[in-house]
Image (spheres, rainbow, N blue to C red):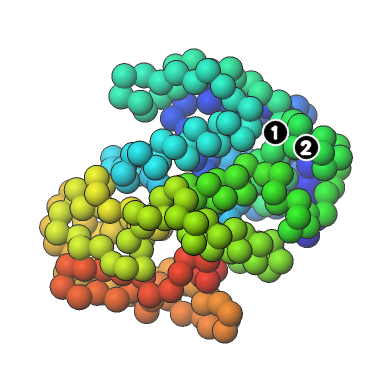
């Protein structure tokens, strides 16, 4: 699978980064023009928000809510370490980075942008990029073995990210990430011992999913969208049916909607398929 190579610098100072998104400044202003999809638009500082391919880490600030912060914060620090960003200091609320060894050089590999114009990317440190022989403005055919050099893989390997696949990712790369996910789960690394996605989570309050239970972030976001600032989870499946997420279940390549993969018993909700067996439509 061939990706565009974009060299630049990673930035977190003055932002609220998490484990699966970070700001990036391309060395060349026109570098973003090669990506398909909605145009990527740099902010006043010349930085573009990335969306890391194939992974989803626990939410730190979604609609004013967060998931259990222990694993969310560990994911962010794992991302920083993988990219060579050190000496990170946060504000008192641990919301915004006040200082860091910032503007660290590195590379991204990307082909397209997502719904909000964020380049869907593999992120690599400068050393990892040199290891692959990356050249700014060039193309690189990404093999499954190449994935081990990416920050994306580092987060999956440490069990600090869930696999969240979309239709744009080729099957061989997806299969390698699925293998890494199963290895991390079997080794009980990171968040996996606390995960309740398939076992089921009893949503008897917002605190059940913001402070206590660790679940797939996509499921968390849908629960937050439904619950808002309160209420009960009683009509959650019906809500999902009215607001469908198209999804394919592997290995049968069975197309369905997310509500058909949710089992609900009273206030207990669970996903019936492992996250690595799902491919969502953009």
Residue 269 coordinates in the image, percent (x, y): 26, 68
Residue 59 coordinates in the image, percent (x, y): 38, 45
The Cα atoms of the two marked residues, 2 and 1, are separated by 6 Å
Q: What is the secondary structure assignment of the residue under circle 2?
A: helix
> What residue appears at the point 47 percent right and 51 percent down from the top-left corner?
189
Mark 2 touches mark 1? (CB < 8 Å): yes
> What residue appears at the point 70 percent right and 51 percent down from the top-left corner?
147
Label 2, on which residue? 129
Question: Which quadrant is home to the C terminus?
Answer: bottom right
Residue 169 coordinates in the image, percent (x, y): 66, 62
Residue 52 sits above or below residue 174 on the image: above
Q: Is residue 162 visible?
A: no
Question: Which quadrant is home to the N terminus?
Answer: bottom right
Mark 2 neighbour density, 10 Å: few (under 14) some (14–19) many (20 or more):
many
> What residue appears at the point 20 percent right and 75 percent down from the top-left corner?
265
Residue 56 sits above or below residue 72 on the image: below
Label 1, on which residue? 125
Q: Is residue 210 visible?
A: yes
Pick the residue in front: 170 or 277.
277
Pick the residue in front: 207 or 186.
186
Report the disc number at residue 45. none
> What residue appears at the point 20 percent right and 60 percent down from the top-left corner?
203
């Amino acid at each position: 699978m061939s990706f565009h190579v974009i060299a630049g610098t990673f930035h977190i100072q003055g932002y609220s980064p998490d484990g699966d998104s970070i700001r990036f400044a391309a060395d060349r202003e026109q570098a973003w023009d090669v990506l398909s999809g909605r145009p990527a638009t740099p902010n006043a500082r010349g930085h573009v928000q990335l969306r890391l391919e194939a992974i989803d880490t626990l939410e730190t600030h979604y609609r004013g809510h967060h998931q259990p912060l222990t694993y969310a914060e560990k994911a962010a620090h794992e991302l920083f370490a993988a990219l060579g960003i050190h000496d990170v200091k946060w504000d008192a609320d641990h919301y915004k980075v006040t200082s860091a060894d910032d503007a660290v050089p590195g590379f991204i590999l990307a082909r397209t942008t997502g719904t909000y114009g964020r380049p869907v990317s593999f992120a690599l440190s400068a050393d990892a990029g040199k290891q692959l022989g990356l050249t700014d403005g060039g193309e690189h055919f990404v093999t499954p073995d190449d994935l081990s050099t990416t920050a994306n893989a580092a987060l999956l390997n440490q069990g600090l990210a869930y696999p969240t696949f979309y239709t744009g990712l080729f099957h061989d790369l997806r299969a390698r990430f699925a293998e890494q996910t199963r290895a991390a789960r079997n080794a009980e690394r990171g968040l996996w011992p606390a995960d309740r996605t398939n076992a089921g989570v009893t949503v008897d309050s917002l605190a059940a999913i913001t402070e206590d239970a660790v679940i797939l972030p996509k499921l968390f976001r849908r629960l937050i969208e439904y619950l808002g600032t309160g209420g009960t989870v009683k009509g959650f499946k019906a809500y999902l049916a009215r607001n469908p997420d198209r999804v394919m279940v592997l290995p049968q390549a069975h197309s369905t909607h997310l509500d058909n993969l949710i089992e609900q018993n009273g206030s207990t909700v669970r996903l019936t398929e492992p996250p690595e067996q799902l491919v969502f439509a953009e």
